Every structure is written in C-alpha cells, then in structure tokens.
C-alpha cells in the first residue's frame, strides 16, 4: 500500500495552512491540478504522493477550518463545495500560545500551561494523529503567527542542559515556537519552520536535532519579494551592475499582516528579510531599506514594490522597478507541501539534522556547519535537485 504522510501544522487555521490543505484535498477530489507545485514534474523515488498527504494541527482559533478559511478569503465557497469540504469537519487541536511572544494574536483554544505539560500534549497529539489517520510517518511544520525575537543572551538558550532546566522551571525565555520544535524533535519527528520565529534554530534545539538525527529546516518561507531579490541580485552581480540602494516596501492586510503590525514581531521578519542582499553581492548595500505595512483593504493580496538603484559602465546610474502583485498564501502553500515531502524523504533516507537542500524555500536558510547560508536562488535550486537526484 502507498505510504501515507501526516503533516501536523502549528497554526493550522491560518491562511497558508488552510490553502495548503484545500489544495491537497482538491487534488484528491480531482478538482485541482498539480499546477504551481514546484516538484510536481520531478519523479523522485521514495517521495510521498500529494494525494497521500493528511493534515492536522494546532491553533488558538476554535472554529472549523472551513469557517477560518472563508474569513482569510483565499479559498471561497466554491472551493469548499468543490473538493475542499473536508475543511468544514476539521478543527484545530489545542495550542500552546503566549501574547508575550505574539502581542496581537490570541485565542481561546489553548492547552494547559506549563512547558513540560505542553510538550507532552503536543507529543500525544502527534501519536493520536498517526493512529487515527493510519499514517506511516508525520512531519511538523510551523505556520503560526510570527513571534517577537527572543533575548539571545537568556540563560535557558545557551546550552542543552540550560534549556532542559528552563523547561522544568517554565522559563519565559522559551517561546511557544520552541516548545513545538522541541516536542517534534524529541519525538523523532522532522520539523520545518516556515515563519521568522526562533525555533529549531535556537542553539540547544539545533544540537538536539543533530544528535538525534532528526531532519529540520527553516526559516521564514521565501515566497515573493525576497524570492525575486535572490533571483535578481546574482544577475546584477554577474553583469557588474553595482547596487547603490534597494528600497523594498510591502502592503498586506491578512492576519499575518496584523501579527506583523506589532513592532516586536515585525523585527523578526525584518531580520530574516534583511540579510540576503549583502551575502549575494559580496559587499554591503548601505541603503537597503525594507518596509512592511499592514493595510487591511488588500487582505491576502500582498503588493510588493522594489526600487533598485544601480551604477554601470562609465559610472552611469540606472533604476530598476519591480512591482509584484502577489497572493501571499497562493505562493506559500505549495512550498509548504514540498517542504513536508522533502523533509519526509530525508527521514526515510536517514539524513538527519539541518536539511540545507531546502534553502531555496527559505529567506534565512539554516545551515549545518557554521558556514554562511547560500541565498542565490539558482545555486539553491541546483542544491535541491542534486539532493533529490533529478538534476
Ligand atoms: N507568503 C506567505 O504567506 C508567507 C511567507 C513567509 C512566511 N510566512 C509566515 O507564515 C506564517 C503563517 O502565515 P499566514 O498568512 O498563514 O498567517 P495567519 O495569521 O493567517 O495564520 C497564523 C495562524 O497561527 C495561529 N497561531 C498563532 N500563534 C499560535 C500558536 N502559538 N500555536 C498555534 N497556532 C498559533 C493563528 O491563530 C493563525 O490561525 C506567518 O508567520 C508568516 O510570517 C508566510
């Protein structure tokens, strides 16, 4: 019988999660094609089929996923009637959340407090999900709202032993995102972080994943503006067009935008967005500005503008303008699906620790051995196809 993969999503009621689930359910029902899925035309031995994926997960919101999806406005009544009806019968498991880490987002669907109790609960949920859906394997993907940046010098984040003590004492330095990541890694379940929050990249958790041989990847999905940046910057470098400045701005009106409307959550996003350019070009772009604005009328239809000032031959100056009118979740959902399939394949191949071959999917790719991440989209794509064995 074909292998069945469970995807347990942190933030399962969100716009990206419900779009991913709807897309797969509609593939099963025959009302969605494989268009827009980056690895659909690659025949990779051992990679789970899209129609053999099952979903579940945690959220602070206590409504059916169908109701939540309608509110996000990405899929509508038509999709719910046309294959994605399964969302109406799905509800999120109780979540570990903290307004101390995500000021603008709260909800009633919370598990009992206490770090150790939360981890036990998350691991119980994974076991129950596996049994109920008769799954062969499970992966966990973080699609929850962006948390504030933790204080890097907090004692609990300095070593594995200190982290364990922090779990015992409910140390506030340990965020909800870290609890989910710890629970997954400790259960031997592959884990990916599609958000900018600090999770499996916290030093004690990255070390735990390495020692236990559990595949992990992150962080912050590279979907729109940053994807374009990492495609354009290598070309500008190759043509010796010096980047004098790069002004990037975004408007978005979904709940992700609301979460980022808190300055501390926003800082997490700016941190992951800010690093790619200098690393690709090999020199600092002093005037690299990135702005994100919550603008409700646009909902999930994010608009990104980029103005790039470059200097070429004979010192002549030129400008490039990029205007990406995208659909945030429509870009993100297929990446989440592919990340889950590749992470699962890594587990089947016995490939543990950080999965660098997934770099093309992330704004701030995690790396294994302390070297700088590869941001160049073309090189990242080659890395992925080489690892898959289809290049
Ligand atoms: N293109 C994209 O959409 C894109 C790109 C890169 C990264 N991301 C990141 O992906 C994440 C999801 O984006 P979205 O547009 O679906 O956001 P969303 O606000 O629609 O969904 C987030 C969900 O997480 C839930 N949540 C918050 N804290 C939680 C917790 N502690 N435990 C469980 N659930 C929790 C919320 O209730 C909400 O349902 C965000 O962090 C976003 O920054 C999105």
Image (tube, helix red, strand yellow):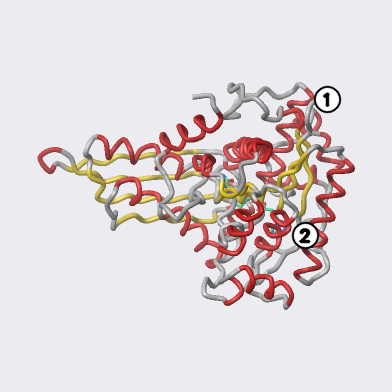
Q: Secondary structure at mark 1?
A: loop
* Label located before the other in sequence (1 or 2): 1
Number of the label disc, if any, that sits on residue 76? none
Q: Residue at x 75, y 43 (%)?
A: 138
Name which quarter of the figure residue 34 lies in: top right
Q: Quadrant of the N terminus?
A: top right
Q: Residue at x 69, y 64 (%)?
A: 176
Of the residues tagged 1 and 2, which is closer to the observer? 1
Asked if the beta carbon under badge 2 is closer than 8 A to the nearest atom of ligand 1, the reply is yes
Indicate whether 361 appears above or below 246: above
The residue singled out by tag 1 in the image is 1
Asked if the beta carbon under badge 1 is closer than 8 A to the nearest atom of ligand 1, the reply is no
Front-most of residues 33 and 293:
33
Q: Secondary structure at mark 2?
A: loop
Q: Is residue 243 left or right of residue 75?
A: left
Residue 173, can we see it?
yes
Front-most of residues 27 and 370:
370
The residue singled out by tag 2 in the image is 95
Q: CA distance from mark 1 to mark 2?
A: 33 Å
Mark 1 touching mark 2, by CB under 8 A?
Answer: no
Q: Residue at x 45, y 55 (%)?
A: 370
């Amino acid at each position: 019988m074909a292998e069945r993969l469970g995807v347990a999503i942190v933030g399962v009621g969100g716009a990206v999660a419900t779009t991913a689930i709807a897309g797969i359910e509609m593939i099963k029902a025959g009302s969605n094609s494989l268009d827009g899925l980056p690895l659909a035309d690659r025949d990779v031995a051992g990679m789970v089929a899209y129609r053999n994926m099952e979903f579940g997960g945690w959220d602070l919101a206590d409504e059916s996923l169908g109701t939540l999806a309608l509110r996000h406005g990405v899929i509508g009544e038509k999709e719910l009637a046309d294959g994605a009806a399964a969302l109406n019968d799905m509800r999120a498991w109780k979540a570990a959340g903290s307004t101390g880490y995500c000021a603008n987002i709260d909800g009633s669907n919370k598990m009992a407090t206490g770090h150790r109790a939360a981890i036990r609960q998350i691991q119980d949920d994974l076991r129950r999900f596996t049994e109920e859906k008769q799954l062969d394997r499970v992966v966990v993907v973080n699609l929850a709202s962006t948390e504030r940046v933790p204080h890097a010098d907090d004692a609990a984040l300095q070593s594995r032993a200190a982290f364990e003590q922090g779990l015992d004492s409910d140390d506030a330095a340990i965020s909800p995102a870290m609890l989910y990541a710890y629970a997954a890694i400790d259960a031997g379940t592959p884990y990916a972080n599609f958000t900018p929050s600090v999770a499996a990249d916290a030093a004690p958790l990255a070390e735990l994943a390495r020692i236990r041989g559990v595949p992990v990847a992150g962080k912050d999905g590279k979907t729109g503006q940053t994807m374009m940046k990492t495609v354009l910057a290598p070309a500008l470098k190759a043509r010796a067009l010096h980047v004098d400045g790069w002004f990037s701005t975004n408007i978005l009106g979904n709940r992700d935008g609301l979460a980022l409307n808190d300055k501390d959550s926003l800082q997490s996003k700016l941190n992951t967005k800010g690093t790619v350019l200098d690393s690709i070009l090999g020199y600092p772009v002093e005037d690299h500005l990135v702005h994100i604005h919550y603008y409700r009328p646009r909902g999930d239809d994010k608009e990104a503008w980029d103005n790039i000032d470059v200097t070429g031959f004979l010192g002549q100056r030129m400008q490039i303008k990029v205007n990406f009118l995208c659909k945030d979740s429509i870009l993100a959902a297929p990446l989440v699906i592919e990340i889950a399939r590749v992470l699962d394949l890594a587990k089947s191949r016995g490939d543990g620790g950080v999965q660098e071959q997934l770099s093309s999917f992330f704004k701030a790719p995690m790396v294994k051995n302390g070297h700088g991440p590869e941001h160049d989209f073309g090189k990242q794509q080659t890395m992925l196809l080489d690892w898959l064995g289809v290049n």
